[in-house]
Image (tube, rainbow, N blue to C red):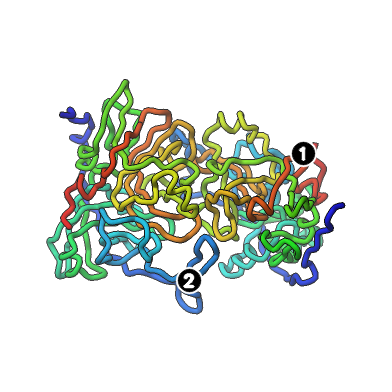
Amino acid sequence: MTPPLSTNSADLVAVSVAGHIVHPGFPGLPAEPYRLASDGTAFLLPTYGGIVYNVSVGDRAFGLAADCIHPGVSIRQSEDTRNRGLNVYACVGNRAKVMTGQAAGTTGIVTGKSGRFSEQVIIHFPKAARARMAVGDQITIRSEGIGMALTDHPSVMLKGIGPELLAALPRRTEAGRIDFGVVATIPAHLVGAGLGLTSEGGSLHLQSTDRRELARHGLDALRLGDIVALADTDSRYNHGFLRGARAIGVVCTTDGPRAGFGPGIAILMTAPAGELGGFEAPGTNIATLLSLEP
Amino acid sequence: MTESLRWNFDDLVEMAVTGQVSQPTMRPNGYLHWPDGRAAILPGMSGIAYNARVGDRAFGWAGDHVEPGVSIAHADEKSDMALHYLTCIGNEAEVMTGLARGARGIVTGEHARLLVDFAPEVLEDLTIGDTVQIRARGRGVRLTDHPELEFKKTSPALAQAYGLRAENGQIICPVAMELPARIMGSGAELNAEYVDQDLMSGDRELMAEAGIDRMRLGDLIAIRDVDHRFGRSYREGWVAICLCIHGDSVMTGHGPGILTLITGPADRLGFAVEPGANIAQTLNIRSIA
C-alpha cells in the first residue's frame, strides 16, 4: 500500500468558475473553411468546441476524422479575461455541474484544456447526459488545485491538477525523486505547438506529422485520457526545452492533420532537473483513475 | 562544371506595400519571466533600435526579442497581413514621409512587425509614424530546374545572395550554423508563411557547448529533419534553411527568431557551414568582422 502523498491540500481554496458550452466556429465568408494539413492539402473536418456525442475520454486519440477534437463538452467565457480565469483555475479532475437547461444538476469531471486559438475547458459528462445538453448551457466548476504543492518534493511544480487526480496517479518515490506511471514518454523533438506559450492553462501538442517516428516511440496508439511524460521539457513558466527536465500530462484532445499539431496534452506537473521521473505503466488513463461514467 | 541556376525572376510581380514606424510595445504588467520564474522588464520588440543592427550578435543583449533596425506595421489588419505575406527578405524600402524622406533601406526580417535596416544616420531622422514603403517582390520565386525546393520570402536579391550551388542534383546553401530540431520552439503553432519559430535557448549549457550562443542577427541557419512547407514540423529526411531575425529571449520556449526561407527533401536540399553566411554581408548591408 502506497503511503499518502504529502501535499498542502488542506490549505487549498475552492472557487467557482463557470463557462458556457461553446458553439463550433469557422471564419465568415468570403474566407474558405479549409485548414491546411502538413502536406499542404486543404481539409474540412470537425474541430474544437461544441458537444461531442460519440468521442469520450478513454477512446483512441488517433484515426478519427477530426482536427484536435475535444471529447465530451467544451466550455468557455465569451470575454477574454474571464475566460482566462476559467482556463487557469479549472484543474483536471475537478467536479463540474450543469446549472441550466434540460441536463441541469448533472455532474461531470474536467479532463483537459486547449490552448492558443481555442482556449476552452474540456469536461466529461456521461453520454446520456450529453444528449440532453444544449450549446449555451452554463456549467460551474468547483476549481481546486491552484497553489497545490508536494510537501516532500518542492522542486516539482504542479500545474492544473486537482487533488483527487494527484492522489489517484500511480507513483513511486526513490531517493528524493518522485516517479509517476505513464503510458509513454514523448521525446523533445516531437513536442510541438504550445512551446513558448503559457503553462498555466492551455495545452502542449505532440506533433504527429512523422508517423514512422511516432510508431518508433510507441506513440501512435495513445488514447484520450492517457497519462504521458515529455522528456527534456521544462513547463514551469511556459513550455520549453531543457535537458533533464520533465513534464507529465494527460492527453486531452485527438490528433489532427496540421503541421506542429497532434494530440493535445494538458500539463499536470513539471520539474527542471531530474526531480520528477516516469515509469512505464500501460493503461494509466484518467477514465479509470477518476472512474468516469461512460 | 558548375550548373548555372535558372530562376523565374521575370515572372515575379512587384507591388508596393507600406507600414508605419512603430512604437515599442509591452504587455500589460510588463513582466517577462526567466525559466525559474524570476521577473524582468526588458526592451526589445518594435520601435527604432538605434544600436542593434543586422550582423550584430543575437545573444547577450539586455533585451528580449530584440528586433534590429526599424519595425514597421500597418494599422489596418488586412493591409498588415499583406505587408507580412508579400514582403520578402532583401526587398528595398524607402522612407516616404518626414525628415528621412527618400532614405533607402533593406528588409531584413519579419516578426510581429516587418524589420527594415537603414544606415545609422537615417535612424536619427526617423520618427514613430513615418511611412516606409516596400517594393515587395519574391513571392512565387523558384528555381526552374529544382521544383522540389520551396522558397519563402526570398527576394531576387536574396536568391542571388544565398550563394547556392548545385552538386549532383542537390542544391547546397551556405549557412552560418546548424540547429538541432529538438530545440525548435515557439511558433510551432503558426503557419510557415508567417513570422518565425524561436529556437529554445533555455538550456544555456547547450547554447554554449554547441556554439549556438555565437549566432548573429542575419545568420543563415540550417535545421535537419524538419518540414517547413505548410507549418513547421518534425519530419525525418527534410531540411529547412532559415534566417535569424531577432535576438534572444529570457522566456522558456523562446530565443532568437528563426524565419523559414527554403525547405525541401534532404536529397535535394543540403547545406554547408561557412563563415560569413550572414545577410548583412551577402546583401551588402555592412561588413561584419
Chain of the residue that carries numbered disc 2 in the rendered image: A
Which residue of the protein is positioned furthest toward the right in this rendering? B1
Q: Which mark is residue B27?
A: none
Q: Amino acid at mark 2?
A: Tyr
Residue carrying label 1: B275
Viewer-closest of A17 and B129: A17
Among the 4 quarters of the image, the one containing residue A77: bottom left
Q: Is residue A248 left or right of residue B135?
A: left
Compared to residue B34, the image places residue A24 above or below, namely below
Q: Secondary structure at mark 2?
A: loop
Residue at which label 2 appears: A34
Residue A228 percent coordinates (x, y): 34, 43
Crowding at dot 1, Cα within 10 Å, few <14 / some 14-19 / many 20+, comes out as: few
When the figure is inspected, residue B14 is found, relative to residue A30, above or below; the finding is above
Residue B260: give x, y in percent of width and height: 63, 54
Chain letter of the residue beneath label 1 in the structure image: B
**Residue type at the position of mark 1:** Pro
Q: Position of residue A15 (x, y in %)?
A: 22, 48
Name the spot of residue B37 as percent of width and height, x first: 43, 35
Q: Nearer the viewer, residue B288 or B205?
A: B205
Which quadrant holds residue B206? top right
- Foreground residue among B94 and A90: A90
- Quarter of the image where the C terminus of chain B is located: top right
Residue at image location 58% in from the left, 47% down from the top: B225
Q: Is residue A132 visible?
A: yes
